Image: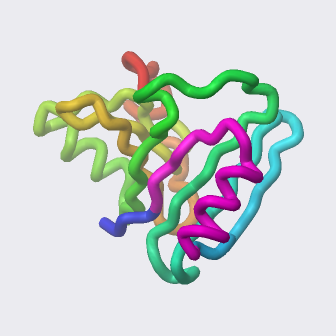
Amino acid sequence: MRYLHTMLRVLDLEQALDFFVNKLGLVEIQRKDYEQGRFSLVFLGPTPDQPVVELTWNWDNPEPYPTGRFFGHLAFGVDDIYATCARLQSLGVIINRPPRDGRMAFIKSPDGHSIELLQNGPSLPAQEPWASMPNTGEW
C-alpha cells in the first residue's frame, strides 16, 4: 500500500492556492476541471513524486464547509482493490463504497475518518460480489 493524498474541500480556490503555494511553498502538480460536475481538483505537493494535498473546489458552493466536512479523505493506492476490500471486510471493516468499478472504494476509520482505496494502475474488471453491492452509510 502506498499513501497517495489527503483531500481538502476549499471555498475559495485562489485564496487556498495563495496559502498552499505562495505561503507554504507547495507546487501545483496537476489540475483537473470537471465542467459537467462543476468542480476542480488541484493537486499540490513539495515534489511530484511525494504524497499530495488534493484541493477540491465545488464551483457553486457559496458557504464555508462545517467542521468535519472540509476534510475529505486519506487516499491509498493498493495492488488489488478486491483482495484488499475482502481482507478488510473479513476483519470487520465496513466497505462504505464498494469497488464496483474495479477502481475505487471507501472505508472509515473507527473515528469516522474517510479513507479512499484506489487500484494501482488500470481498473480491474467488474467482479462480484462488489459489482452489485450497494453503498453503506456515508464516506
Q: Is residue 136 above or below residue 6?
A: above
Q: Is residue 15 magenta?
A: yes
Q: Residue at x 61, y 51 (%)?
A: 55
Task: Depth check: give the residue in front, 64 or 111.
Answer: 64
Task: Depth check: give the residue in front, 129 or 34.
Answer: 34
Q: Is residue 67 above or below residue 57?
A: above
Instruction: From the top left corner, tell me how far across and down residue 54 is, in percent.
Output: 57, 55
Q: Residue at x 63, y 41 (%)?
A: 10
The C terminus lies in quadrant: top left
Q: Is residue 46 magenta?
A: no
Quadrant in which residue 63 is drawn: top right
Position of 102 compared to 108: left or right? right
Task: Depth check: give the residue in front, 3 or 122.
Answer: 3
Instruction: From the top left corner, tell me how far across and down residue 49 is, in percent.
Output: 51, 82
Position of 47 compared to 110: left or right? right
Instruction: From the top left corner, tell me how far across and down residue 87 is, in percent.
Output: 19, 46
Instruction: From the top left corner, tell me how far across and down residue 116 is, in percent.
Output: 42, 46
Q: Is residue 49 above or below residue 41?
A: below
- Give the residues in magenta: 5-25
Describe the colour scheme in one phrase.
rainbow
Position of 92 compared to 7: left or right? left
Q: Residue at x 52, y 78 (%)?
A: 46
Quadrant in which residue 29 is drawn: bottom right
The N terminus lies in quadrant: bottom left
